[in-house]
Image (cartoon, helix red, strand yellow):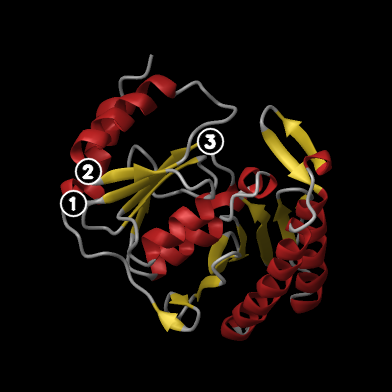
């Protein structure tokens, strides 16, 4: 039996160290360092070096664990695996927009048992482990108690490669503009999720996501008392490439709106 609390706190420390590296590199960062993995899918030496730093420590922290990492691909393990986004919000980073994060989840037999999201610029580390509470810099957090979408602030992300669902997406976006307190697009799904967990947003939704974007944040939402689902209401979100995360109170209302638009896809 591993000590999940100790492992989580060790990863919190690691995230702060890697975040310091990111801030330091940002001072002299140049667009010349940017590459495109695909259309509008950016990467730089900062992403790759941050991932190397993270994996080097995690291999010693939990020997034999596997990895699913954004830049490094998949490495099979036995019982445990880490799901890692070394820099969630790379586009923000390369453009000098100070909102990006590190996201690390630990799974045991494909079930998430710990999650850490470090928002680098605000020095806010959100984390949780199975059997514990959702925390922000050592203080317990919980979701918003708002019960209606009309008084909710909602976060989303914009597709950058998969535009196959734009018609229903824009239809839902239009309706939410009229029936909520507003929508925000921060540029880091991991941050969007933990902002739901601590009550800053009532809902976050997006499609076209990868496991490393959502695994840690989704777990923290659950431990903070929130709800998770796919657009249709199914509860597998880490590998489904779509997610609704909410405070729970407005979840069914939001799924109703979502289904209204996405069930009419052409």
Residue extending farthest front: 27
Question: Foreground residue, 14 or 5?
Answer: 14
In space, the residues marked 3 and 1 are separated at their CA atoms by 27 Å
Q: In which quadrant is the N terminus drawn? A: bottom right
In space, the residues marked 2 and 3 are separated at their CA atoms by 23 Å
Badge 3 or badge 1: first in the primary sequence: 1
Secondary structure, mark 3, is: loop
In the picture, residue 112 is in which quadrant?
bottom right
Question: Foreground residue, 163 or 121?
Answer: 121
Could you tell me which residue is drawn at 33 percent across and 71 percent down?
142
In space, the residues marked 2 and 1 are separated at their CA atoms by 6 Å
Please name which of the two marks, 3 or 1, marks the residue nearer to the observer: 1
Badge 2 or badge 1: first in the primary sequence: 1
161 to 215, vertically: above or below: above
Secondary structure, mark 1, is: helix
What residue did someone put label 2 on? 180
Could you tell me which residue is drawn at 67 percent across and 67 percent down?
80
User: Which label number is shown at residue 151?
Assistant: 1
Q: Which x, y percent locates residue 93?
A: 66, 50
Question: Foreground residue, 151 or 134?
Answer: 151
**Left or right: where does residue 10 sit relative to residue 71?**
left
What residue did someone put label 3 on? 208
Q: Residues within 10 Å of mark 1 (few under 14, many from 20)?
A: few
120 to 211, vertically: above or below: below
Q: Are marks 2 and 3 in contact (CB under 8 Å)?
A: no
Q: Are marks 2 and 1 in contact (CB under 8 Å)?
A: yes
119 to 7, vertically: above or below: above
Q: Residues within 10 Å of mark 2 (few under 14, many from 20)?
A: some
Q: Which x, y percent locates residue 92?
A: 61, 46
**Left or right: where does residue 124 sit relative to residue 263?**
right
Instruction: Let me know if residue 22 appears in the view.
Output: yes
Instruction: Let me know if residue 75 appears in the view.
Output: no
């Amino acid at each position: 039996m591993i000590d999940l609390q100790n492992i989580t706190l060790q990863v919190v420390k690691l995230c702060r160290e890697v975040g310091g590296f990111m801030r330091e590199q940002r001072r002299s960062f140049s667009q010349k360092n940017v590459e495109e993995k695909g259309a509008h899918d950016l990467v730089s030496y900062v992403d790759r070096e941050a991932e190397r730093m993270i994996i080097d420590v995690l291999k010693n922290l939990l020997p034999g664990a596997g990895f699913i990492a954004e830049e490094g691909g998949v490495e099979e393990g036995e019982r445990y695996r880490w799901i890692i986004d070394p820099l969630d919000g790379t586009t923000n980073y390369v453009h000098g927009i100070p909102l990006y994060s590190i996201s690390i989840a630990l799974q045991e037999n494909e079930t998430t048992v710990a999650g850490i999201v470090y928002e680098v610029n605000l020095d806010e580390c959100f984390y949780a482990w199975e059997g514990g509470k959702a925390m922000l810099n050592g203080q317990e957090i919980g979701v918003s108690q708002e019960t209606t979408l009309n008084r909710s602030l909602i976060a989303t992300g914009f597709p950058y490669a998969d535009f196959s669902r734009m018609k229903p997406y824009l239809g839902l976006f239009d309706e939410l503009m009229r029936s909520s307190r507003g929508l925000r697009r921060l540029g880091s799904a991991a941050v969007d999720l933990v902002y739901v967990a601590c009550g800053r947003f009532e809902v976050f939704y997006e499609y076209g996501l990868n496991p490393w974007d959502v695994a840690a944040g989704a777990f923290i939402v659950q431990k903070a008392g929130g709800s998770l689902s796919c657009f249709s209401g199914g509860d597998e979100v880490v590998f489904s490439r779509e997610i609704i995360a909410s405070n729970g109170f407005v979840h069914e209302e939001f799924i109703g709106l979502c289904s209204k638009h996405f069930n009419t896809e052409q």
